[in-house]
Image (cartoon, helix red, strand yellow):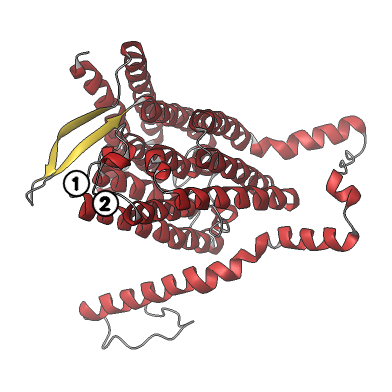
Amino acid sequence: MSTAPFALALIVGVGSPAILLALLGGASLANRPLPERWTGPLAAGLMMTSSAALLVALAVYGATGTGTMLLSYGAWSSSHAGNIAIEFLVDRTSLGFAALAAAIAGVVSAFSNRYLHRESGYNRYFVLLAMFVTGMLLVALAGNVEVLFAGWEFVGLSSALLVGFFHERPAPVSNALRVFSIYRISDAAMLSAAVLLHHLAGSDSLSLLFGASRVASTTALTGTSTTIIAVLLIVAVAGKSALLPFSDWLPRAMEGPTPSSAVYYGSLSIHAGCFLLLRAAPLLEQAPLARVLAGALGAATAVFAGIATRVQSDVKSSLAYASLTQVGLIVVEIALGWYTLAFLHLVGHACFRLLQFLSAPNVLHDLHGIEGAIGERPTPSVGYFHAVAPDLVRQRVFFFALERGLLDPLLDRFFVEPFYYVARGMSRLDRFLCGAVSQPTAIVEGDEDRDE
């Protein structure tokens, strides 16, 4: 088929949220944010345009039956011999996920317009939403590591900033910093895998990992190097999709507005890692140890989240752990080689959780209506485990679930506190270099920044 119309549809699909980001972000930087009556329709219109363009591209691709395609839109940096090109690796999986992301973004954009009406951070929310959607489409369609990493960073940064959306309260800001610190682990693993791929294969093309040509056909990636790259990708996926041992940040991310929780941790962001793992299936097939690791992490996460979701005291945290249960199962399906089932599971679960998160504010209202209709509170059902397990076992399992697997102190000790320590040190060094302080004094653990 002629690639010109198809390539145009792709660039319109990816470019629409990018244009929205440029317009809203540029107006905000100029301290001239667009009025609410313009922002909402503009956001909804460009998101729907993106969704329609990607659906057209998917329909054309399906009708022609074309195989995997690598489309290049030219280099955006020529500072070195290899250049950095904007490349998209297109197949049914990538186009399907991109179309899903754009459609969900359109629904959430329309919902957010009413939900955040007259909210002080209205314009800021849509800037971050546009950044997120742009990042998700880049992750879905990336043809080289530069495009993938740019999209991965857009998703992570916008996620953390939306967790801290209500920054006038201390809890959202603290939880946003925790989420951001865990994301740094994921990003470091992703960057390490990209650098190693480029060093060993001499190319930044993701067709080596995601394309139809199997890794075995590339002599540069065999044996130990394949396993190392696969393990690094699994670490990146674990951080982004809240697999064990990084699951603790997920309930803390519920501090953001309900629409952002729906699109991030119910439907798209939490599935980004699963999608990346699904795309890297050819690599996993050549790395049995990494495949076993992915399956074990997915199974352990599904069991842990299934237990934890039953003791949560609020709707959004319960839905977050329920989502994590299904994410763990999707990872297990990928590890077992059930790729079609995993993709269908991902799509169906994303749509279902989107509906649940968007309707979460009405749950208590509906529950009170049920209680008023029947005249009493519904009696909770007794599960099989509750009926047959001894009291001591049930108490210990309940404590384990209530404390969320005791992951808080583990993550604090080994990930969050070192990140805070380094960040404070870098901040003080920056002020010293700018002449704001007399000397970069040593920072002891627990020292707080008092130079604000």
In the image, is 268 to the left or to the right of 78? right
Coordinates of residue 27 in the picture (x, y in percent): 27, 42
Q: Are marks 2 and 1 in contact (CB under 8 Å)?
A: yes
Label located before the other in sequence (2 or 1): 2
Coordinates of residue 422 in the picture (x, y in percent): 37, 74
- The residue at the point 40 percent across, 35 percent down is 36
> Residue 258, can we see it?
no
Q: Which quadrant is the N terminus positioned in?
A: top left
Label 2 packing within 10 angstroms: few (<14), some (14-19), many (20+): many
- The residue at the point 41 percent across, 80 percent down is 450
Coordinates of residue 236 in the picture (x, y in percent): 42, 53
- The residue at the point 26 percent across, 33 percent down is 88
* Residue 9 picture quarter: top left
Task: Identify the residue position indicated by label 2 in the image.
Answer: 197
Instruction: Say what secondary structure mark 2 lies in.
Output: helix
Amino acid carrying mark 2 in the image? Leu
- Of 287 and 424, nearer the camera is 287
Amino acid carrying mark 1 in the image? Ser
Distance in Å between CA atoms under marks 2 and 1: 7 Å
- The residue at the point 50 percent across, 44 percent down is 270
- Of 28 and 382, nearer the camera is 382
In the image, is 277 to the left or to the right of 354? left
Label 1 packing within 10 angstroms: few (<14), some (14-19), many (20+): some
> Residue 357, can we see it?
yes
Instruction: Say what secondary structure mark 1 lies in.
Output: loop
Task: Identify the residue position indicated by label 1 in the image.
Answer: 203
Q: Which quadrant is the C terminus positioned in?
A: bottom left
- Of 440 and 352, nearer the camera is 352
